[in-house]
Amino acid sequence: QVQLVESGGGLAQAGGSLRLSCAASGLTFSSYTMGWFRQAPGKEREFVADMNWTGLSTYYKDSVKGRFTISRANAENTLYLQMNRLKPEDPAVYYCAAAPRWTYLSGNRNTYDYWGPGTQVTVSS
């Protein structure tokens, strides 16, 4: 049974940082494209960043480029999202997701097969 469990969410000040983690089990983590998505109240779930199975290719939502960094530790079955310079528009529930290895990095949430329950990120101004 595939499980993705996010952690690291919480409250940060605008301009501050948070680091999210996603622990994966029940799948061969190193063979999956992994991504981060977020959903704010009343809004659609949107793409944030993703990374291919090797960790050599990444793709970001324009508004987070230069502020957020996606990374992975395949030996530890863990995906990360380092979020710096948090802005008032960043608060949301953040989800990690897994897609087949051959998935093209396009931010298309429909290509992701497995999802975690999410972790809440709140930013105070």
Image (tube, rainbow, N blue to C red):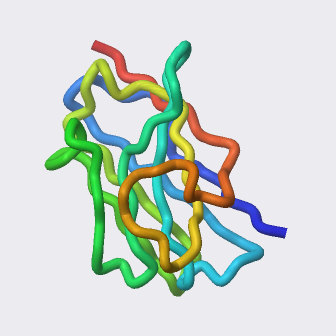
Residue 60 placement, left or right of 7: left
Quadrant position of residue 16: top left
Q: How many marks?
A: 0
Q: Is 16 or 74 nearer to us in this picture?
A: 74
Side (left or right) of 9 relative to 69: right
Relative to 69, residue 118 above or below: above
The relative height of residue 54 versus residue 52 in the rendered view (above or below) is below
Name the residue rendered at 52%, 26% in the picture.
44
Percent coordinates x, y for residue 66 in the rendering: 14, 49
6 left or right of 38 in image: right
Above-or-below relation of 17 to 13: below
Q: Nearer the viewer, residue 54 or 76?
A: 54
x, y (%) of residue 25?
72, 72
From the viewer's perspective, tell me whether residue 80 is left or right of residue 24: left
Is the N terminus in the top left, top right, bottom left or bottom right quadrant?
bottom right
Identify the residue at image location x=66%, y=60%.
113
Percent from the top left, x then y, of residue 58? 29, 66
Extreme residue in the right direction: 1
Tell me residue 125's x, y (percent): 27, 13
User: Is 56 or 118 nearer to us in this picture?
Assistant: 56
Q: Is residue 12 above or below residue 21?
A: above
Q: Residue at x 54, y 16 (%)?
A: 41
The residue at the point 29 percent across, 40 percent down is: 17
